[in-house]
Structure formats: structure tokens, C-alpha cells
């Protein structure tokens, strides 16, 4: 949390627009995709690299073709609009989140792929929680209801599952 708040390049990194081109949400954050493309995973800031590597190792998954990596931050009144991270039929896309920041609320709401108006799930914000979801599932991040800051590390792209080192299948 301290590292994320002290990172010097918070900027507008996440925005979504409706069919008429009107902004639906704008969320501040820091994007690291260009750093990753230039220097690979080890080129990320050490704390971010460590968190992402630990997540990959514990989940047994690897993002092999990253499309986005960054930090998003929301404060009261900055609800994210409902959106998807990839095409509806993209079976090989995964979105991974690590919740960081203050202990607050701001749930992730999941919607039905066939009916994006119908809510199918809700994942509570809790610092250090990791969320892995099919990036084609419509979802929206709610802003906190208090004056705290809700942050997420987001890594998304094409993935593959890694074999367990224990020799099992």
C-alpha cells in the first residue's frame, strides 16, 4: 500500500465509454505495460514484481501474453462502469486482481455474459485478496463508501496453467 501510494506517476489509466463515446468512468492508476514490454517481468518495480510473481506461483498460472498490468485506484463516488476486459468468445483470457490499500468496501460486481443487466456474483474488497476471473465476464468495481482509497493491481491477458512441481497431474 505504501509503495502504491508513493509511486510518482498516478495518471488516468482506465476509462470506459458508452456506444455514443461518452465517458462512463475514469479511474486513476499507474500503467506498467510498456515497462513490461521493454524489460520483461523482472523490469517491473520490485514490490510489484514480487506480488505478481507470488500470485502466479500460488495460483499455478502464468500470463503469457500480457495486455495490461497496472494499479487502479478509486475513492468515494468513482464507481467503475460495467465492462469486459476482452471479447465475449476469448476463452484464453484471464484477469487477475490483487486488492491492496486500506480496509474498506467497494465490491466487484459480476454479471451474466448473456444478460449484462443480471447480477450473478459479488466479491467483497479485502486487502491482499486475489481475484481471478474470465475477462469476458461483465463486471464493475464499486467505489468505497467511506473516505478510504481502494486500490487493485491488475494483470490481464492470455494465460496458461503451470504444472505442479510435485509431479502430480
Image (cartoon, rainbow, N blue to C red):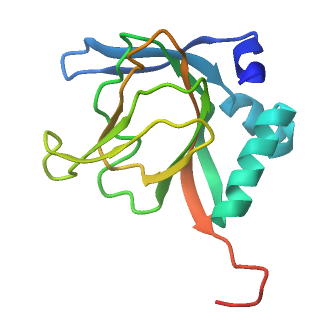
Which quarter of the rendering shows the C terminus?
Answer: bottom right
What residue sits 73% from the left and 61% below the top?
57
Indicate the quadrant where residue 6 lies. Answer: top right
Image vertical order of residue 1 relative to residue 64, above or below: above
* Residue 84 horizontal side relative to residue 154, left or right: left
Which quarter of the rendering shows the N terminus?
Answer: top right
Image vertical order of residue 81 relative to residue 27, above or below: below
Residue 44 visible somewhere in the drawing? no
Image location (x, y in percent) of residue 52: 72, 46
Residue 118 visible somewhere in the drawing? yes
Image vertical order of residue 133 relative to residue 32, above or below: below
What residue sits 64% from the left and 25% below the top?
31
What residue sits 47% from the left and 55% below the top?
93
Indicate the quadrant where residue 116 lies. Answer: top left
* Residue 22 horizontal side relative to residue 131, left or right: left
Image location (x, y in percent) of residue 18: 23, 21
Report the front residue among 35 and 169.
169
What residue sits 38% from the left and 34% below the top?
107
Report the front residue among 94 and 99.
99
Image location (x, y in percent) of residue 149: 54, 16
Number of marks present in the image shown: 0
Amino acid at each position: 500500500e505504501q509503495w502504491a501510494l508513493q509511486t510518482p506517476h498516478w495518471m488516468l489509466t482506465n476509462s470506459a465509454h458508452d456506444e455514443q463515446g461518452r465517458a462512463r468512468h475514469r479511474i486513476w492508476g499507474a500503467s506498467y505495460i510498456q515497462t513490461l514490454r521493454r524489460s520483461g517481468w523482472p523490469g517491473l518495480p520490485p514490490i510489484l514484481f514480487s506480488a505478481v510473481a507470488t500470485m502466479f506461483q500460488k495460483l499455478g498460472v502464468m500470463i503469457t501474453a500480457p495486455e495490461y498490468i497496472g494499479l487502479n485506484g478509486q475513492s468515494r463516488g468513482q464507481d467503475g462502469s460495467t465492462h469486459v476486459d476482452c471479447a465475449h468468445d476469448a476463452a484464453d483470457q484471464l484477469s487477475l486482481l490483487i486488492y491492496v490499500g486500506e480496509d474498506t468496501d467497494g465490491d466487484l460486481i459480476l454479471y451474466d455474459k448473456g444478460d449484462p443487466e443480471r447480477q450473478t456474483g459479488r466479491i467483497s474488497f479485502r486487502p491482499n485478496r486475489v481475484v481471478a476471473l474470465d475477462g469476458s465476464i461483465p463486471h464493475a468495481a464499486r467505489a468505497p463508501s467511506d473516505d478510504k482509497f481502494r486500490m487493485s493491481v491488475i494483470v490481464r491477458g492470455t494465460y496458461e496453467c503451470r504444472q505442479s512441481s510435485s509431479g502430480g497431474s
